[in-house]
Image (cartoon, rainbow, N blue to C red):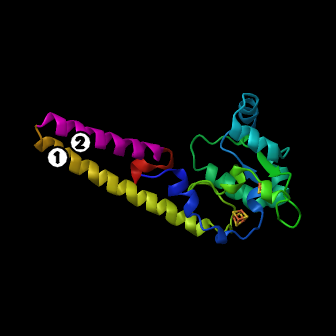
Amino acid sequence: MGNYEENYLNKRPQHLCHMCGKCCRVVTTSIPYNKLQEMAKNNDKGAKDFLSLFVPFSSIDEARNVDAEIVDNIINRLKEDENYKEDEITFYTCKYLQDNNLCSRYETRLDLCKHCPSSPWVIVPPGCGFEGWLFWQREEIKQKIRRSKEELLELKLLKMRTNDEEALQKIVAVENKILKNIDYYKKYGSENW
Ligand code: SF4
Ligand code: SF4
């Protein structure tokens, strides 16, 4: 199966990055700001790292003044989620980004910077060099999930034809592994692929 590094991070073609700095200039998180602060207080590494770099804008309009295209792109995408709440969204900017779009601490940048864009489903700024590649990564995962669903049907038939208890247990174990994988992508809509 492979891990996150093997399946995703190491495959990312870094040359696709235009070094435009947009993903450092205006960003948001799926976790509300107050929750992030709480997590940081409780020593959550991800929250602490993020807040050590990113400074919140005082309002969505302030972020819009810096780059309205990025803000509106993010908001439009988030609105697709029925649980979307505008008052829970905070935009941030990185204090280490320079006016020339380059990072002032590139050599010591954190893993969260090195991992950006960190998943095929991350919302990247319009024009980001990874847009097309991320699209194909999502399609590849969807294909795998569709194949897994076909395998589930085959396993179901196999179960009906098997009386051997040991064989049945093995089939159930494989089924559970497949179901777990499908469930992992549920938040991205795997039930409908
Ligand atoms: S927005 Fe995309 S292309 Fe621009 S710096 Fe970030 S990763 Fe690179
Ligand atoms: S530290 Fe550098 S790479 Fe990381 S978000 Fe800030 S400007 Fe971008």
Mark 2 Cα-neighbour bin, 10 Å: few <14, some 14–19, many ≥20: some
Query: As drawn, which residue projects farthest toward the right?
Result: 99
Q: Which residues are magenta?
A: 164-186
Tell me residue 97's x, y (percent): 84, 58
Residue drawn at point x = 83 percent, y = 56 percent: 105
Is residue 42 visible in the rendered image? The answer is yes
Question: Residue 136 at x, y = what percent?
Answer: 50, 66
Q: Which mark is residue 171?
A: 2
Identity, as a three-letter code, of the amino acid under mark 2: Ile
Residue 119: image tag: none
- Would residue 54 be seen by someone viewing this image from the given angle? no
Judge by depth and name the residue closer to the eye, 61 or 164: 164
For this view, does 56 lie left or right of residue 5? right
The alpha-carbon separation of the residues under discs 1 and 2 comes to 8 Å
Numbered mark located on residue 158 in the image: 1
Asked if 4 appears above or below 47 in the picture, the reply is below
Q: Is residue 166 magenta?
A: yes
Give 189 or 5, whichever is nearer the viewer. 5
Tell me where residue 47 sits by quadrant: top right
Q: Quadrant of residue 163?
A: top left
Image coordinates of residue 168 in percent, x first then y, are 19, 38
Residue type beneath disc 1: Leu
Mark 1 lies on a secondary structure that is helix
Is the residue 172 above or below the residue 124 in the image? above
Mark with earlier residue (1, 2): 1
- Please identify, in this view, whether the residue under mark 1 or under mark 2 is nearer the observer: 2
- The quarter of the rendering in which ligand 2 is drawn is bottom right
Element class at badge 2: helix
Please tell me which residue lies in front, 162 or 145. Answer: 162
